[in-house]
Amino acid sequence: MSGEELRSIWRWQITLFAALLLLVIALLGISFGPIHIPFTSILRSFLGMDSHLSEQDRSVLFDIRLPRVILAALVGSALATSGAVYQTVFRNPLADPYLLGAAAGAGLGATIAITNSHGNLYGLLPAFAFSGAILAVVVSFFISGKFFAEPNSLLLSGIAVGSFATAVQTYLQQRHSASLRPVYSWILGELTAASWQVVTWSAIYIGVALIILLIVAKQLDGLMLTDEEAYSLGINPNKIRVIAVIAATLATATAVAASGLIGFVGIVVPHLVRGLTHRVTNRALPTIAITGAAFLVLADLGARTLLSPAELPIGIITAFVGAPFFLFVLRRKRLINQ
Amino acid sequence: MRNLKIAVYVEHTPNNLAEAYAEISQLASITSHKTQAAKVIASMKTAIAQSIATKKLRKSSKFFHELDNTLYSATSSTFIGKVYADFNLTNIADGAATADDGGYPQLQSEYILKSDPQFIFLSDGEFGENAKTVAARPGWAGISAVAFNKVVILPSDIPSRWGPRLVDFYQFVGNSISTN
């Protein structure tokens, strides 16, 4: 494909603009907090110059704010990219990364970790949430039987598995009412647990998943055609769908394990990028990932500052923006279909 | 149950000592144990007053009451917050009181570092939190309570019993701030 043809599909300037936006928002993210740290000192510190920061300021900057901003960026990029991929794979503009039961499975895993009688599983909450998300999606696939031969069957399996996991989760919550607060807090999404350790394992899993999705981005565009047309272009649609859903699920499960259930990012961001650029191509995935990162870093900044020094669950912020946007997309789709 | 003509008595969570005593009296009145209840209340008042008199700090110290490791806390408007206030402890969660009418805001880690509490009370010990895990949190090793080993794990049973066992909680808090 010539450079001119590629430019007609996607313009790299858009991706660059999104990256600059992310940089500015990330700088804002590490600049605000209950402890005032002069912006010039932050910049000097990052440039390796003498910043005159106290030990506490350095700790706040490098051990609290920076890992949190990076984790928000990782989770935002994972959810946004997964959402875009799910929308392509299922040919449904309202699909989100939690469609196949990942959220409910992760919720059940987290609830098991929180409500176990001796509390010794609490430290394994991310692992339980991750396993729950993966297991729920695998079960959805297993029940639907024919993978993507009948996408609606897979969707229904996902809904059924999700409902079942939610029912078990609710039962466990009722049996352990003392654990309601941590479960509720986790469900609303939080980045309070951000640390370099969480950032490291999140970056590995999300990085691998995003690389796979970026590699298959071109073939994903083939899924917007009929399967016969895709085959004629040398694309095996079912193979691409399976690879895409596995990678998107890995990214989603990691995001959920690191930060709880943060909704609407996977719907808002892909539609925002595609709507603003008037491009439906999956060449937009890098831009969607970067914009998702910027969106969640900004949402987290709101979560930390709106009620400061208290914290607002980040899921409330994303839902506050996302729910009206979701309705907007729904209405727009209806108008187009008329 | 009322339709089945079964007498029902519902106790709401008391918001302070006076309400706790009133509920004990009311329950005693219903079950015809007024005299015993009066004795229980009198002994509670004596024990609590004694605990406060002997353990109350002369100079106020700041504290952080941790409900869970996502840093939810309780302000002085809650019953538990009032217990701490009786010992002249200053609640850092009061700085975020406007965030939650119910008195249970979620604090930011950075704010806790900035407030530098002299005592940290953990009510999430049953979920694996302790002085070691608290010290391992980013920046927390420098907090006075951590540096001077004043991180207290609250017994999971005592802080939520707003009846005669309130005395146990008062004595536990008193002992924690005097012996630590």
Image: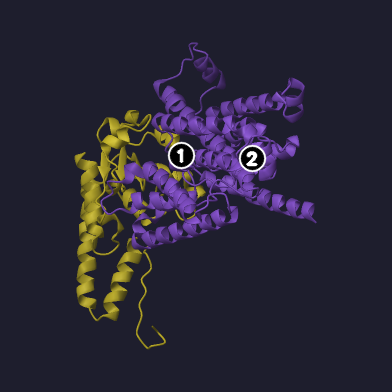
| Picture layout, residue B95 above or below residue A63 | below
User: Counting other residues with Cα less than 10 Å from the Cα at mark 1, is it few (<14), some (14-19), or many (20 or more)?
Assistant: many
Picture coordinates of residue A312 (x, y %)? 51, 45
First in residue order: circle 2 vs circle 1:
1
Is A247 placed left or right of B62 in the picture? Answer: right
The amino acid type found where label 1 is placed reads: Thr
User: Counting other residues with Cα less than 10 Å from the Cα at mark 2, is it few (<14), some (14-19), or many (20 or more)?
Assistant: many
Picture coordinates of residue A172 (x, y %)? 36, 59
Query: Circle 1 sits on which residue?
Result: A254
Q: Which chain is purple?
A: A
In the rendered image, the residue lying farthest to the right is: A338
Tag 2 subunit:
A
Secondary structure at badge 1 equals helix
The amino acid type found where label 2 is placed reads: Val
Based on the displayed image, in which of its 4 quarters is residue B177 positioned?
top left
Picture coordinates of residue A283 (x, y %)? 66, 31
Is B112 placed left or right of A294 in the picture? Answer: left
What colour has chain B?
Answer: yellow
